[in-house]
Amino acid sequence: MAEMTYRDAVAAAIAQEMRRDPAVVFIGEDVAAAGGVFKATVGLFDEFGPGRVRDAPISEQAILGATMGAAMTGLRPIAEIMFSDFFAVCWDLVVNEMAKTRYMTDGQVSLPLVIRSANGGGARFGAQHSQSVENWAMAVPGLKVVAPSNPADVKGLLAAAIRDPDPVLFFEQKSLYPVKGEVPDGELVDKLGTAKVLREGTDVTIVALALMVPRALEAAERLAVDGVSATVVDLRCLVPLDVTTVLREVAKTGRLVTVEENPRLLGWGAEVASIVAHEAFWDLDGPIVRITTPHIPLPAAEGLEDLAIPSVDRIVAEVTQALD
Amino acid sequence: MSEPQTVADRTVLDEATRLRIYELMLSMRALEKRAYDLFLQNLVKGTTHLGLGQEAVAAGFGAAMRADDYTFATYRGHNHAVARGTELEPILAELCGRATGINSGKGGSMHITDVAHGMMGSYAIIGAHLPIAAGAAWSAQYRGTGQVAVCFFGDGTTNIGAFHEALNFAVIWKLPVVFVCENNLYMEYTPIASVTAVANPAADRASAYGLDPIIVDGNDADAVYWVAAAAVARARGGHGPSLIEAKTYRHSGHSRADPAKYRPSEEVDAWMARDPIDLYRLRLLGLGVSEDRLVAIEGEVGVTIDAATEAVKVAPFPGVEKLDTELWADGGSSWRR
């Protein structure tokens, strides 16, 4: 085990896969010589050179088009979209081209590619550099969607995404980049579509993703002091969605609370709530609760941004109220 | 800016290549006319964007490309599949939504794809496939295979952002890609000149990316061939991309819903008089190819399209089991575990 930051785990995963497979290449803005604006890809350019780690112009459509064209002709490209908000300027390539092409060609075209992107709030960047857009991706058939909460998962899931034969959108929560955690030594390859139970309880199951996971865990600690025993599930992937783990953990506690960073309407928690309401209705002892960011763009000022994104205090309060 | 080139180096084109070009153009014409007929019989569903009149561009390039080169086309892409060697029957079957279609009926008229022949897809969102073609060229460059990507698009595409992103990107990375603008004078229903800042929508933008402006008579298959051969050789030789503007004209409307009444009749007449297939036939005769030989080829194409039509009419529709296959590489479409 070695302690590593979330950002260093990104570079570690890419390096691990580039050493193993010469078909893996990496493209993005400021990712090569500069090591990325979040310093998540430091060292890759030095180790693998300009042929495999390439700086691109501010041309997100060109970056993703090139990624797709490379993937359909024998490479396993990784692209970086610097901020996930920028998906809005190249969403055609993701939704109309990458997601649909295998289906439309009845399997003639394979697209083993990964798009990494810094997602989510907490950095006081304002509404155009802070969105959580993982639910946009979840809504599109043909995209796999990953959003890790800790360095070990970053390394293992990113490696799995690179080896996956389908298009994967890999959302890195930008406030987590400096967070440290233990990462197993040696080659690490995780499995997409597997949630993790991080804490087992008896009263309520809290399902969270990315930045909401450490907040849910801290909330569970505080709830325990008040005598509330909470299970915390880290969903880790939205597609494939590990419904089995969610249903099993809800059956044990009889309660479901989802904690989402995305705005209210059609967030991933709505889908999870729908599945649980349909398939585990008789396991429930009370209404499902969704904790989300309000349906607003994110404000920049720290006091306002902190009010908007679900906090430990809010999770504790809403869980307590739900169980009252 | 230097004067636009009209025709590249004109060395002698061998007869076999010319006859191949002629046969390709006839096949394209036969396919598109049959697609129109079958649409009227309600056998072709949805929409079709016919390439009638634009055959010389696809055929000239098809003859100049290597078997392992990549083609990227638009929703008006039937000609380009034929140019790479895709049989007529699976294309027609795809238009008719049959299980024997080249995409198994899951793509339709606008998405003809035949990877086995280097036809890497027909893309129906304007501009998207230019950067995708650049990516295939990046892959060829990285793998050192000498393959070239050729990307066809319409005049309207020159006004969308992806066109400009792809050109800049291809030039800075010196990618082996050839961008081919088929300028048929109309952006859907609107004259391209009325919505474009320059007279030649592709060629006049070339200098912005450090490229030579290249204009070719898109109704002259030989002229297209020479320009294509030069651009493909340049790309294969590691000298980077080219942007070619081929002036041509579609004989029908934008799509099956469009009678194209917005076009002045004198303009239509002038271009119909320059039908690329008629022009080529006259050239072949002038070069001493016998009438009998041409008639024989014409007869063979007629037999092929009739046989394809009969086969498609009795071909099965896709089974329900195809509905949820091939979303993922594991063959399925499951989103949950």
Image (spheres, coloured by chain):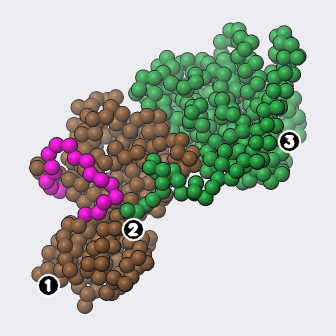
Camera-near label (3 vs 2) is 2
Mark 1 Cα-neighbour bin, 10 Å: few <14, some 14–19, many ≥20: few
Tell me the quarter of the image containing the N terminus of chain B: top right
Residue A247 position within the rendered picture, expressed as x and y whole percent measured from the top left: 33, 73
Which residues are drawn in magenta? Answer: A177-196
Chain letter of the residue beneath label 1 in the structure image: A
Write down the residue under mark 3: B264
Tag nearer the camera, 3 or 1? 1
Asked if the residue under mark 2 is in contact with the one under mark 1, i.e. CB atoms within 8 Å, the reply is: no
Give the spatial CA distance, label 3 vs label 1: 82 Å
Kind of residue at badge 1: Asp
Q: According to the image, label 1 marks what residue?
A: A226
Q: Residue at x 18, y 70 (%)?
A: A199
Taking the spot 44% from the left edge, 39% from the top edge, the residue there is A71
User: Is residue B123 in sight in this rendering?
Assistant: yes
Q: Quarter-wise, where is residue A288 in the image? A: bottom left
Per the model, the C-alpha gap separating discs 1 and 2 is 29 Å
Q: Which residue is mark 2?
A: A268
Task: Give me the chain that's brown.
Answer: A
